[in-house]
Each structure stands twice: as C-alpha cells, then as structure tokens.
C-alpha cells in the first residue's frame, strides 16, 4: 500500500518537473501551468480516459513558484554539468557585450566544444559588466567566472569577439591565457 502511494507521488513530482521543463522551453509565463495545463490535463482525463481528474491533478504541483523553482534547479544542474565538462576539455569561447534597456552592460559568453563526437554550442554565462566594456574589464569578468567554476583558462583554444573596439581593446589589455 505504501509503495503504490509513494510511486504515485513520485509520478506527480516527475510530471511536475517534465511540465516545468516544457514551460521553460516555451518561454511562456510560469502561471500557464495552473491556468492552462492542469485544466487541460483534467479535461483529457475526464473526457478521453473517463477517470476522475481531481486525484491525479492534485499530485502534479504546477504553481508559479513551483515551476520557477524547478526551472532554477534544472538550469543549475545544467550549468554545473557544463562547467564540470569544460574543466577537462578544450573549447572555443565567443564573447559579446550587449546593453540592456536600462543601459546596463552585459557580457555574454558562448562556448563551443566537442562532446560524443558532435560539436556543441552552449551559453556559458551572462554577467553584468559593473565598470565598463573595455577589453580589460571583460577579461576580468571572464577570469573571475573561470576561477569561481574551476575552469582552467588554458582549456580555451580560441576566442571570438564581434571585433568592436571595446572587445578588442588596446594591445596592452588584450586577452592572454
């Protein structure tokens, strides 16, 4: 009896994570879980499967806060996996600075590497540039991230930028590993 109850709760938790992932991928607001997805699941259960929907839908937590928390947990796992992988492999990095609507400067770092004989490209981080967008400042943000995540700078085999003067910098402030 306890095993079947535990299994049903695990199934509800698994469904909650899977649906949270779908919501995150869709880019829709987190509230869509409670407002649209759960009512749609209940309708399918009642109409197609002729099952009481309330028992099942109560076991799938999809509140705004729950979906946000699950999305954060999953993204944290992905970042830690990616950083662990980059600690032991060579990769290329692409850096680009951008400006947010409130004029805050943002540094985006994309990495390209080979995994399982396939070329992969992932967003490594997006960090605010606190001081300015000069090459030296950009390098310090990158270096600090690599130190924090224990990724050796020596694993970088190439760096690509958009060629803007802020990215290229003065010869004395260019990137050196």
Image (cartoon, rainbow, N blue to C red):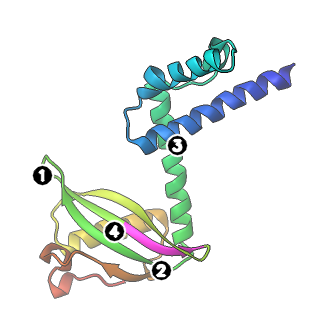
Q: Nearer the viewer, mark 1 or mark 4?
A: 1
Q: Earlier in the sequence, mark 1 or mark 4?
A: 1
Q: Which residue is mark 3?
A: 73
Labelled disc at residue 142: 4
Counting other residues with Cα less than 10 Å from the Cα at mark 3, is it few (<14), some (14-19), or many (20 or more)? Answer: few
The Cα–Cα distance between marks 3 and 2, rounded to whole angstroms, is 27 Å
* Distance from Cα at disc 2 to Cα at disc 1: 33 Å
| Label 3: element kind | helix
Viewport quadrant of the N terminus:
top right
Q: Position of residue 13 (x, y in %)?
A: 64, 31
State the image coordinates of residue 139 (x, y, percent, origin top left).
Answer: 28, 73
Of 23 and 6, the residue lying toward us: 23
Name the N-terminal-most of marks 3 and 4.
3
Residue occupying the point 20% across, 75% down: 167
* Circle 1: element type: loop
Q: Which mark is residue 103?
A: 1
- Locate residue 102 relative to residue 157 in the image: left or right: left
**Residue 30 against residue 118 in the figure, above or below:** above
Above or below 70: residue 146: below
Q: Which residue is located at x 50 percent, y 80 percent?
A: 90
| Residue 78 showing in the rendered view | yes
Label 3 to label 4: alpha-carbon separation: 24 Å
Q: Which of disc 1 and disc 2 is earlier in sequence?
A: 1
Compared across the picture, whether 21 is left or right of 50 comes to: left
- Distance (Cα) linking label 1 and label 3: 29 Å
Highlighted range, magenta:
110-115
Residue tagged 2: 155
């Amino acid at each position: 009896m306890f095993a079947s109850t535990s299994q049903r709760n695990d199934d509800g938790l698994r469904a909650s994570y899977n649906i949270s992932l779908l919501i995150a991928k869709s880019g829709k607001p987190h509230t869509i879980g409670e407002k649209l997805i759960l009512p749609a699941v209940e309708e399918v259960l009642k109409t197609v499967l002729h099952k009481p929907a309330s028992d099942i839908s109560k076991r799938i937590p999809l509140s705004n806060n729950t979906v946000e928390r699950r999305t954060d947990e999953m993204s944290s796992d992905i970042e830690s996996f990616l950083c662990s992988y980059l600690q032991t492999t060579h990769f290329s990095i692409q850096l680009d600075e951008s400006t947010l609507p409130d004029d805050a400067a943002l540094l985006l770092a994309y990495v390209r590497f080979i995994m399982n004989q396939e070329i992969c490209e992932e967003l490594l981080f997006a960090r605010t540039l606190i001081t300015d967008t000069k090459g030296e400042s950009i390098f310090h943000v990158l270096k600090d991230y690599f130190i924090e995540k224990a990724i050796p700078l020596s694993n970088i085999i190439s760096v690509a930028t958009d060629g803007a003067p802020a990215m290229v910098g003065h010869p004395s402030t260019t990137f050196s590993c």
